[in-house]
Image (cartoon, rainbow, N blue to C red):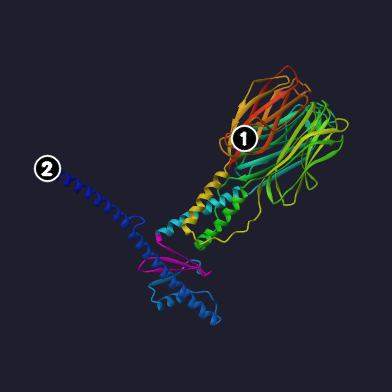
Amino acid sequence: MKNIEKGITLIALVITIIILLILAGITLAMLTGENGILNKASQSKIQTIISEEKEQIILAHNNIKSEKLVNQENLSIKANELQKELDKLNANAIVSNLENETTLIIVFTETKNKYFLYDTSKIEGPYKDEELEEDYAKLEQLEKKVATLENKTTMKSKTETVSNIKIEKAIWKPIISITIEESGYADIYGNYNMVNNNIEAYKGIRIIQNNTEIAGNGKGGKGTEIQASISCTRKVEKGDIIYLEASQWISVEASITSAILQINYFSTNEVEPEPNLDKKPKIERIENLENKVLKLENKTNVKNLVKYEKDKSIPTETLTKVSTITIPEDCYADIYAYYDIINNDSSEYTGIWVYKNGEILVNKGKGGRGGLAFDSVSLTKELKKGDIIDLYVSQYTGGTKNLNSSHLEIYYMPLTELEIEEKSDSKTLNERINELYAKVTTLENKTTMKTLSEHVEGIVVQHGTSVKLAEITIPEDCYADIYAYYAISNNDSKEYKGIWLYKNGDFLCGNGKGGSGGKTANDENCIKELKKGDVITLCCDQYTSANQTIENAKIVINYFPK
């Protein structure tokens, strides 16, 4: 029995010790932890000291202002005036001027706390010297990043036009060139009007970057005058030369009545911020950055306008308006227009036209066979609030024809100036700097163009069938510029050929009509909002003969992440 009693006593002792250790740990944590009593007491003491120091600055400041008001003196406060008033309050502090002379620095000698008093009467601080150095380094980095982003989202433009250019038969002739002045992302648009004398023979248009063809299309088609149009988005480097070229097989010599090559581009060059920012108060620099970042966020918030139409009557030999969009705000806009019209397998001319405020922006048209004639155009423009964009269709196939469907679609970057809200003082300046860093990093990602591409050759396309040529899966949510192209053997057949882009099996955009030529080149360019996992498929069809071979085909998707 004695041994049992001793065993029970030892167990109780062990349990008691464990409980005491747990209680001691809890007590220690309550005293010394991050939210412990001692830490809270220490923080409370620090905050009390800060409040007292700020009160002394405010009181001294107000005393000086009051006296100056009574004496009708200039209200700006000098360092020696504030120093004298703080001495009267027994504040152990030293006052000096910042470089810009309107901001006063107050350092309390015991705590080493540093405050800034601005001429707006706002107090900033306290800071330690090492904190200030780190924050100023971050500010300098942010200011350079934001200056670069502002440059990166400001569209610049170069345009060259020519008229009355003679094009010899069976050659590709450069008719306009532009040399790139800054590296960046370029929306390239080319167009020409050619006297055709209603001949069905082949006509072509293409864009060359240095020595490489980056976009092109061409086929035969009737029309007294025909319009060829082409557009694409590409990364360009300073010094690159962009050429617009034309070709024709209609006569010994044909005339281009007018042509345009326009490059709207966004520079990717790094930019230095405005000078002397370091002489501005820290809070002013932060507020300046916050305002700029807010504008950039608005600018990169792409918006969409679209008008669909169907079952409209299109009289012959007239220009018929089918859609109108009024621009709601100043913007950079990507405009895409499409139509398909009942063609009854006619070889006669059909055309698509986009106008801004009654003046032609872009047009494209020529004859070509097919039960339906499909056509599309795209280009990038800076637009103003209130601009009116009209889509017109014309046809010379005989009698009134039915517009099966059309759409006019505009993706745009707003340029509207936002009203800046007053910033709350609830966040510390360091928190505001870190928040700016996060937003700027997001903006840098959103304004960095990424590229996906697929290229194929030698695919056989059977008569009367639609064949998949290439496919790309989208890796992230984005706004995408999609360019597709193929060249197909044609054996100089006038029959229909088409190019089609699908998203997840649904029609996205395309064009098609007949036209002669030993080889037919077709391309399509459109802007779309895409989601991660979307599958973009390039297809083509042809009605020229039993079998034709795709010489080469490609999809190029240049996109900006959301």
SS of the residue under disc 1: strand
Amino acid at dot 1: Ile
- Look at the image and say whether residue 200 sits in the magenta stretch: no
Question: Which of 326/499 is in front?
Answer: 326
- Image quarter where the N terminus lies is top left
Sequence-wise, the earlier of marks 2 and 1 is: 2
Residue 561 percent coordinates (x, y): 57, 41
- In this picture, which residue range is highlighted in magenta? 103-129
Label number found at residue 510: none
Residue 24 versus residue 360 in the image, above or below = below
Task: Tell me if I can see residue 195 in this picture.
Answer: no
Q: Quadrant of residue 213?
A: top right
What quarter of the picture does the C terminus occupy? top right
Please state if 370 lies on the left or on the right of 183 as rendered.
Answer: right
Find out whether residue 113 is within the magenta segment: yes
Furthest-left residue in this view: 2
Disc 2 residue type?
A: Met
The residue beneath circle 1 is: 557
Which residue appears at 57% of the width and 42% of the height? 448
Q: Quadrant of residue 183?
A: top right
Q: Nearer the viewer, mark 2 or mark 1?
A: 2
Residue identified by numbered label 2 = 1
- Per the model, the C-alpha gap separating discs 2 and 1 is 89 Å
Q: Is residue 66 above or below residue 177?
A: below
Tell me the residue at 46%/76% (across/down).
81
The quadrant holding residue 134 is bottom left
Residue 178 on image: x %, y %:
68, 41
Residue 104 left/right relative to 23: right
Tags 2 and 1 in contact by the CB under 8 Å rule? no
User: Residue sitting at 59 percent across and 59 percent down?
Assistant: 421
